[in-house]
Image (cartoon, helix red, strand yellow):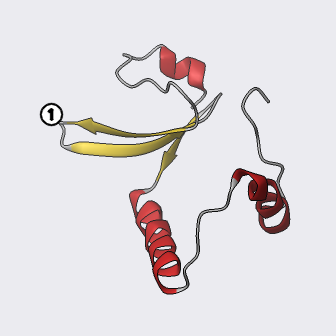
Amino acid sequence: MPRDQAKDQKECYRCEEPPCIHIVIDERRKIFKIFIEDYEYIIPIEFSKLLKTCKVIEENSRLKRYREASEADEDYLARKYLGAEPLREGS
C-alpha cells in the first residue's frame, strides 16, 4: 500500500527514520500484522517468513560466527546476490 494512502487511515504508528518495522495489533479482533515501511510504501510481511528468516540468521551467526554486513558491504551484497541496487535515504 502506498504510504500516502496509509496516511488517510488513523495514524497510530509513525516511522521517524525509515525503514521501520511495525507490529500492528488489534486487541478487539485479536489480530496482528507485521509491516515494513520504507520511504514510499508500507509492505505487509508474513509472520512465518519472518520467523524462518530469523531462524536462519540465528543459526548462521551462532554456529558460523557470521556478523551483520557493514554499510560498506550492503551495495556489494545487494548487487551480487539480489541483482539489485540498494536504495539510500533521499534516493
| Mark 1 closeness class: few <14, some 14–19, many ≥20 residues within 10 Å | few
Image quadrant where one finds the N terminus: top right
The kind of residue tagged 1 is: Arg
Q: Position of residue 43 (x, y in %)?
A: 55, 41
Q: Residue at x 60, y 63 (%)?
A: 68
Query: In the image, is 21 to the left or to the right of 77?
Result: left
Q: Secondary structure at mark 1?
A: loop
Residue bearing the label numbered 1: 28
Q: Residue at x 64, y 29 (%)?
A: 39
Q: Is residue 27 above or below residue 73?
A: above
Image quadrant where one finds the C terminus: top right
Q: Residue furthest left?
A: 28
User: In front here: 29 or 22?
Assistant: 22
Q: Residue at x 18, y 43 (%)?
A: 30
Q: Position of residue 79 (x, y in %)?
A: 84, 60
Q: Residue at x 42, y 17 (%)?
A: 9
Query: In the image, is 15 to the left or to the right of 73?
Result: left
Q: How many dots with numbers?
A: 1
Q: Position of residue 72 (x, y in %)?
A: 77, 53
Q: Position of residue 75 (x, y in %)?
A: 81, 54
